[in-house]
Amino acid sequence: MSINHIVTPLDSAILDSKEHYVFYHKMVDFAFKELIVAVQREKICDDIEVQLFKQYCDLLLYSIEAIRVKYMYDEEDNMKVDLTDSGFPNYLEFRYLFNDLELRDEYLGKLTPIAELKEAFLDTLLRKKESINKRKLFQAASIVYYSSVKKEYIFNRFVQGKIINAPESIDIKYMTSWSFYDVSHNRPFICFMYFKYDGNNINDYRDEIYEVLKTVADRDMLLDTMAYTIDRKLPKVSPKLIKRIDLGPLHNVFAKDEHQVTHTILESIGKKEIPLESYAFSLRVNEVASKSEFKEGGFFSKQVLQRWDEVFKQKYVLAPHRIIQLLYNKTPEMMNTLAKPPIEVSSIQ
């Protein structure tokens, strides 16, 4: 494990009140759904990429909802959120989900039976006319958490998509996708690779492709370096286009990074110029394409490799109308670096 994979609680802040907790989850859920709609509407991705993009975002939202249920009435522990360059839950929270669900049966065996808990709730509410205490509510939330959350739907540090046929409009046979949660940034990334295969049946080489992607393309790095490494380690594959989407940061009241957008939002919230629930979403799309091929190696071990073009970089900002006006007023230089004018999304009501 490299130093970039080391995550500690010091990278995070704790949401120490349930009001903060509910507010944060509402914001993340709302912002992600707005992001999915905007990516499709603005054609930031092709149709097939949008479908895959939505699937990975759904995994993230499912995992974040599982975290919400887990901590809903827990008085002893609180969720940790990365504030430095992310705005998302700290990667450790996803690991904790996996660890919990590995021991699902053991935990369920220790919890109060559902029928008994229901009877106690009814007795308290109908006969005693009292509110349910926090301990009982936590027991009920734990039952929901351990009995309903599916481990296979939790967003792992690396999520591999299937190899499928590329659109007929391009002269490339196959494409695949994958997503990873970069632990140094605490942000999710989504990748697409279009490639040709020097063989008869792609399924014969599928496991090799998946293993290489999981090994060398599971973290943020220079995109042309990633492309070259994939190309070299897969002799039967000729990558032709690799696209990587960096989701975030999510700029909001909880963030504490040095990003211009974050600083502008926090300053304006502090001056009461904009409401507390104001947010913006940064999105970066980088892609690199093969412009030619060359052969490398000895007479008996020559390998055809790609000669990569310059990395094409695009930055986007998605925000409600009021925040877009604010950014134009206070960060006009930054706005000129975007691939297109800021994309308007809805405000949180």
Image: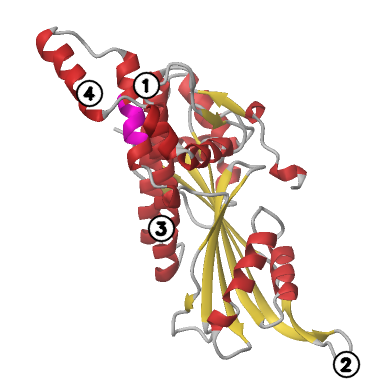
Number of on-image labels: 4
> Which structural element holds mark 1?
loop
Write down the residue under mark 3. Answer: 55
Q: Position of residue 281 (x, y in %)?
A: 48, 43
How far apart are labels 1 and 2 at the CA level? 67 Å
Tell me which label, 1 or 3, sits earlier in the chain.
3
How far apart are labels 1 and 3 at the CA level? 29 Å
- Name the magenta segment's main secondary structure: helix
Determine contact: label 4, label 3, CB under 8 Å. Answer: no
Disc 3 residue type (three-letter): Gln
**Residues shaded magenta:** 140-145
Q: Position of residue 274 (x, y in %)?
A: 41, 26
In this rendered view, identify the residue nearer to me: 44 or 165.
Answer: 165
Q: Residue at x 36, y 40 (%)?
A: 30
Disc 4 residue type (three-letter): Glu
Q: Residue at x 24, y 14 (%)?
A: 132
Tell me which label, 4 or 3, sits earlier in the chain.
3
Write down the residue under mark 1. Answer: 73
Left or right, 64 with reference to 119: right
Determine contact: label 3, label 2, CB under 8 Å. Answer: no
Residue 62 occupies which quadrant of the picture?
top left
Q: Which mark is residue 299?
A: 2
Q: Which mark is residue 116?
A: 4
> Which structural element holds mark 3?
helix
